[in-house]
């Protein structure tokens, strides 16, 4: 059963588009949350929140049961900073949210987490890094936290979901809104794999522009460390990195192509903070002292043709026609060999009939 | 006096007899045409009068009544000019004898009395022959088209004067039957697979597609050679049999796009409607319920270049013809059924700007744009496309010069052999190709062993394939097995079939 304090905080959290500062200053005025509803505090509430927000707050309080019902209908829970369930890590940060809305497996908040953030328009190289690192992190037992955006965020979530591992997505909108809409399938995947959706915004909140930097502090706040595969110069993920540094989180960055705009931001960050330089998931996991079993890669016996292909792919990616030339196989034989290699996780087809080693 | 002249006209591809009755009465000079004639048919009045006058006959200055019986079907086109003129001449007793009653007349007249070409002669003659008519008088322009039909006596004449002379006893030779085989040999395609260098995987996929009658989608950036590859497809398709050629010719003749100097379609049609095409132009329709591109592509290839640029509505209308292999066009005046047994070949760019997933170019499309672009191709439509291949425009100068590419003729020979295997297998099922298999037939003919099943399961898991792709993979695997002459589908066939599911993999659908 929820306490009255919880209900007051929920009512406050459900005031649409009320900035965190006002909420915090309001709560600082009182010793006990219960005081907010006393007649004496009424004037303070109106003064600090403004007429509109204050009215909405009291209205919300009046219909708090309806709000609770609506949350229940969406299978959404909430935690307040007064709860035991409130993630400890968030107490470490300066502007923690008073209330978090949660959907899914809320035990995920108790576990060690690492954030993976980055550009919305990654290069193929960036995607590859995000995918490989996120998968390794998740398999080593860390929960991957990200922002559910396109690009690197989605890749990181997908890497977990496709391996049946849990991941936390922090939304910049209400949890009943799926933004971007094409991630509907990913959203279901996260929930099916024991993942968790987190947001500080009440139901029905739109993904407004200023929500994103606000949301970023929660991403870095929930995590022990933040990993950045690739970011452009004005990328929002650089905000996350800055916040992470302010919050005292470890940061890890992989170097990108120096000619690539989409990696200019992360490269610049590396120049400023060279210690963040990372080359492999193991670098990160070692730095975080994550214990993990050493997994031997299964030895696979390769046929002559397969060996030829793998050898040829060592240097760079090759086109189907080039492989055809190198191996001297027929098209049918080569497609066959490649599919087998691909199913065994040895090679990968990038787009346009190019192949690389996985 | 009353004269009754036989003629024939078409309802879709089926012809029916029309009696042209001409009666001359006393009264003020006039001309009345009854029997639901369309505008072009009504205008015959002026053409007939001038043609008769300019051929040296006399146009009666009396009251003429012309009836086109049966009077309740809509009559289209100018093909009644000739029977009306013959009727007028007979009714005004300028034409001696009753010989005209033995013939069916079909032809348009020009003002100087010359007989002009009429659309749809082949289906008219075939229907009339089935209804027991054997003797015809048509325009010289339609001679070649009529010459491929056996068992009829057709006189192809130059002008009205010749018709009258002939009906009054002049000697004329009926049209000589021409051989389809000899016509075939003189017509090539102008392109050949040997001209396409590189693109080994696309060529292989197209060979599989033609061998099994599968529909294909090619995905690739602009300039990758998708259109060139598509144009080569007819060159490896099995030769059309005479029956197929006649079916194609019938539709082309009705649509008025038949080459009169050849008279029959000898090469498989390759239709490329532009992406601004309207629905009636694509599937057939208009006030006259004319055949659309899907019917003109019958027994050939319908090529949709830049498929997502077509209107969604137009693409969705393809679903029924792809399934039933015929199309029923219903209009207020009539309901017509046209054949639509075509192989769909489509091409598309990976995104609106064309560079999505490219190694060298930057894609400037937003995710929403790409999503909207790809989602133009609905699931049900994609379910009917068995092979999706990626075509890319890498320049391999060294590879391009190396080796001789196979000619279309060599590929065609292999395909003929595979088609023969399919024909034998489906002898009792009433279908010709693997692509046409129903679910029941897939269960019967595409049994796979444990190894293949494991492979398929692994592929679904690892490669993000959509489950609805299974039947398509099985069909294609069947064709690949047939190409190897294998009785059973083995894992390597499944593996190759999986390779041709490019779209599923590229876009995480």
Image (cartoon, coloured by chain):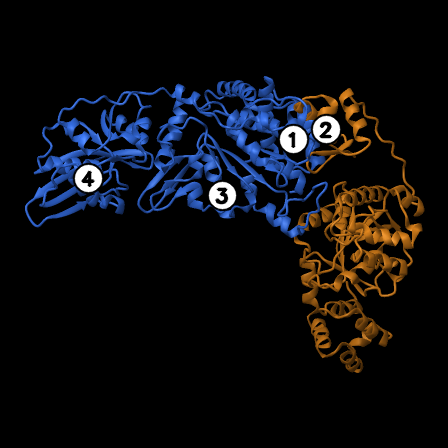
Whether labels 3 and 2 belong to a single chain: the reply is no
Q: Mark 1 lies on which chain?
A: B
Residue underneath mark 1: B498
Whole-percent x, y for residue A102 in the image: 76, 57
Residue underneath mark 4: B51
For label 1, the crowd category at 10 Å Cα-Cα, with few meaning under 14, some 14 to 19 and many 20 or more, is many
Is mark 4 in CB contact (under 8 Å) with mark 1?
no
Q: Which mark is residue A322?
A: 2
Mark closer to the observer (1, 2): 2
| Nearest the eye: A243 or B396 | B396
For label 3, the crowd category at 10 Å Cα-Cα, with few meaning under 14, some 14 to 19 and many 20 or more, is some
Secondary structure of residue under mark 2: helix
Secondary structure of residue under mark 3: loop
Badge 4 or badge 3: first in the primary sequence: 4
> Which of the 4 image quadrants contains residue B16?
top left
Q: Chain B is drawn in which colour?
A: blue
Whether labels 3 and 1 belong to a single chain: the reply is yes
Q: The orange chain is which one?
A: A
Residue underneath mark 3: B274
């Amino acid at each position: 059963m929820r306490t009255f304090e919880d209900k007051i905080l929920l009512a406050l959290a459900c005031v649409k588009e009320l900035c965190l500062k006002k909420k915090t200053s309001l709560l600082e005025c009182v010793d006990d949350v219960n005081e907010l509803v006393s007649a004496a505090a009424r004037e303070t509430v109106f003064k600090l929140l403004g007429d509109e927000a204050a009215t909405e707050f009291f209205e919300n309080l009046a219909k708090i049961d309806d709000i609770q019902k609506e949350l229940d209908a969406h299978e959404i829970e909430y935690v307040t900073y007064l709860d035991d369930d409130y993630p400890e890590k968030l107490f470490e940060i300066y502007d923690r949210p008073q209330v978090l809305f949660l959907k899914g497996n809320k035990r995920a908040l108790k576990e060690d987490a690492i954030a993976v953030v980055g550009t919305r328009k990654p290069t193929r190289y960036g995607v590859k890094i995000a995918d490989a690192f996120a998968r390794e992190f998740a398999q080593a037992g860390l929960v991957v936290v990200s922002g559910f955006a396109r690009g690197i965020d989605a890749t990181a979530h997908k890497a977990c979901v496709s391996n049946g591992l849990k991941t936390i997505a922090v939304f910049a909108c209400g949890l009943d809104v799926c933004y971007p809409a094409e991630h509907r399938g990913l959203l279901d995947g996260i929930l099916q794999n024991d993942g968790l959706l987190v947001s500080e915004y009440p139901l029905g909140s739109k993904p407004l522009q200023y929500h994103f930097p606000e949301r970023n502090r929660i991403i870095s706040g929930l995590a022990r460390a933040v990993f950045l595969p690739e970011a452009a110069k004005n990328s929002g993920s650089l905000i996350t990195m800055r916040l992470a540094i302010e919050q005292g989180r470890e940061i890890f960055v992989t170097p990108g192509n120096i000619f690539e705009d989409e990696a200019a931001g992360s490269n610049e960050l590396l120049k400023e903070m060279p210690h963040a330089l990372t080359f492999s998931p193991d670098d990160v996991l070692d730095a975080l002292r994550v214990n993990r079993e050493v997994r031997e890669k299964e030895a696979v016996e390769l046929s002559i043709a397969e060996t030829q292909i793998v050898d040829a792919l060592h240097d760079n990616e090759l086109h189907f026609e080039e492989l055809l030339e190198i191996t001297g196989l027929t098209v049918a034989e080569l497609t066959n060999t490649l599919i087998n290699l691909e199913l065994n996780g040895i090679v990968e087809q990038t787009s346009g009939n190019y192949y690389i080693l996985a | 006096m009353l004269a009754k002249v036989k003629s024939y006209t078409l309802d879709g591809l089926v012809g029916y007899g029309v009696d042209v009755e001409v009666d001359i009465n006393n009264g003020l000079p006039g001309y009345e045409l009854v029997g639901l004639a369309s505008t072009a048919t009504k205008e015959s009045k002026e053409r007939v009068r001038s043609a008769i006058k300019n051929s040296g006959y006399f146009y009666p200055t009396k009251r003429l009544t012309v009836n086109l019986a049966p009077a309740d079907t809509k009559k289209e086109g100018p093909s009644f000019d000739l029977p009306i003129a013959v009727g007028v001449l007979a009714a005004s007793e300028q034409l001696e004898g009753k010989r005209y009653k033995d013939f069916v007349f079909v032809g348009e007249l020009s003002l100087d009395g010359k007989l002009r070409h009429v659309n749809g002669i082949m289906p008219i003659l075939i229907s009339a022959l089935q209804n027991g008519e054997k003797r015809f008088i048509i325009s010289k322009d339609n001679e070649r088209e009529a010459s491929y039909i056996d068992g009829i006596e057709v006189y192809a004449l130059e002008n009205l004067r010749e018709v009258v002379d002939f009906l009054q006893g002049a000697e004329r030779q009926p049209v000589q039957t021409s051989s389809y085989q000899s016509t075939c040999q003189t017509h090539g395609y102008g392109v050949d697979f040997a001209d396409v260098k590189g693109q080994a995987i696309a060529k292989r996929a197209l060979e599989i597609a033609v061998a099994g009658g599968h529909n294909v989608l090619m995905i690739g950036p602009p300039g990758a050679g998708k259109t060139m590859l598509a144009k080569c497809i007819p060159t490896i398709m099995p030769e059309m049999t005479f029956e197929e050629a006649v079916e194609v010719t019938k539709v082309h003749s009705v649509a008025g796009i038949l080459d009169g100097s050849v008279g029959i379609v000898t090469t498989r049609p390759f239709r490329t409607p532009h992406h601004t095409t309207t629905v009636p132009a694509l599937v057939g329709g208009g006030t006259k319920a004319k055949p659309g591109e899907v019917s003109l592509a019958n027994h050939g290839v319908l090529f949709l270049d830049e498929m997502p640029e077509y209107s969604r509505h137009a693409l969705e209308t393809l679903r029924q013809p792809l399934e039933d292999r015929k199309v029923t066009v219903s209009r207020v005046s009539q309901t017509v059924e046209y054949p639509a047994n075509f192989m769909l070949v489509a091409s598309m760019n990976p995104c609106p700007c064309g560079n999505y997933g490219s190694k060298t170019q930057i894609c400037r499309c937003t995710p929403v744009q790409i999503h909207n672009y790809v989602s133009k191709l609905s699931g049900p439509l994609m379910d009917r496309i068995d092979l999706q291949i990626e075509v890319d425009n890498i320049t391999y100068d060294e590879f391009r010069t190396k080796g001789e590419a196979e000619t279309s003729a060599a590929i065609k020979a292999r395909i003929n052999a595979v088609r023969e295997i399919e024909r034998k297998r489906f002898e009792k099922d009433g279908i010709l190709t693997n692509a046409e298999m129903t679910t029941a037939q897939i269960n019967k003919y595409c049994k796979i062993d444990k190894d293949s099943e494991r492979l398929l399961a692994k592929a679904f898991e690892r490669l993000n394939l959509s489950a609805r792709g299974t039947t398509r993979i099985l069909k294609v695997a069947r064709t690949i097995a047939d190409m190897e002459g294998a009785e059973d589908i083995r894992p390597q066939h499944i593996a190759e079939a999986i390779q041709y599911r490019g779209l599923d993999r590229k876009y995480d659908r």
